[in-house]
Image (cartoon, grey):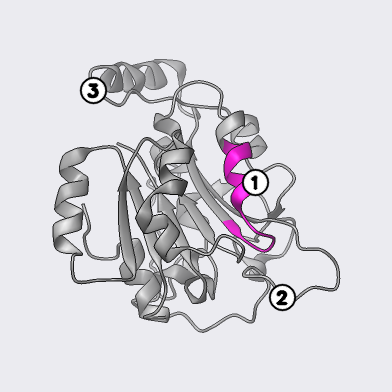
Amino acid sequence: LPTVGSVHEAAHAVDPAARVVSVDCDPVVVAHTQALLAAVDTVGVVRADLRDTATILDHPDTVRLLDLTQPVAVLLVSVLDFVPGDLTDLMATLRRIMAPGSLLAITHATPVAGADQVAAVEDRYRCTSTPLCLRSRAAVRALVAGLDLVHPDPDLGGPADLVPVTRWRPDPGTLPLPDGVADDPLLTGLLAAVAATPVPAGTAPTLGDAPARRPTARNRTNRFDPVVAQQPLIARRTR
């Protein structure tokens, strides 16, 4: 459900004209979101399964709000680890509709804890309507293969790569995690990455290489990219 710090709030804190399309397969969530955002004409809500890309792309809100000939940001946050099976076709479809310079942000849980702990977590989720689908670090990395990774912390240098979500450009002033928490498998096993679709040589700067803006308390979009909200956004998720 929309709450403090949701995608459209973060985007509008940077650019009030930013356009956002959210996707959810839960009819109750969609109905509640539509009621809350009825007066916000720059935000659309689509009821669909993430894997049903045709329904998402052909929906009137998507057509009205997003110009897919221009760079967009596709946010797959806390969703792919609830999508069973091979993700190859889904990711390929999303890439095809993303113009050069677009950004893809993903998070995904991986089994870094002991085998007994992992089995216990998976057993709990099997009792729900959304079983957990853990994938290896290599499998998660493959989801953004061929794209240009955005560095999680340029000040540290080194190559860009997957990192735990707590290490992906935390907000300025964020306090260090307490001893023992930073190494908790629930955090270290939840990986994040942001990657840009390649841009042909000699073209304009992309979302990922535009000059950075100084983050503010509400400018949470900066943890993904400094100016992502200046372009259309599309947030995709299922339940």
Between 202 and 175, the one nearer to me in the picture: 202
Q: In this view, does 175 lie above or below 118?
A: below
Return the disc, 3 or 2, that comes first in the chain's sequence: 3
- Give the amino acid at mark 2: Pro
- Is there CB contact under 8 Å for labels 1 and 2? no
For label 2, the crowd category at 10 Å Cα-Cα, with few meaning under 14, some 14 to 19 and many 20 or more, is few
Return the disc, 1 or 2, that comes first in the chain's sequence: 1
Q: In this view, does 127 lie to the left or right of 188?
A: left
Q: Is mark 2 on a helix, strand or loop?
A: loop
Foreground label between 3 and 2: 2
For label 3, the crowd category at 10 Å Cα-Cα, with few meaning under 14, some 14 to 19 and many 20 or more, is few
- According to the image, label 2 marks what residue? 205
Q: What element carries label 1?
A: helix
- According to the image, label 1 marks what residue? 96
For label 1, the crowd category at 10 Å Cα-Cα, with few meaning under 14, some 14 to 19 and many 20 or more, is few
- Give the amino acid at mark 3: Thr
In the rendered image, which quarter is residue 237 located in?
A: top left
Q: Is residue 3 above or below residue 51?
A: below
Q: What element carries label 3?
A: loop
What residue is rendered at 65% in x and 46% in y?
A: 96
What residue is rendered at 39% in x and 30% in y?
A: 82
Q: Which residue lies furthest to the right in this view?
A: 201
- According to the image, label 3 marks what residue? 128
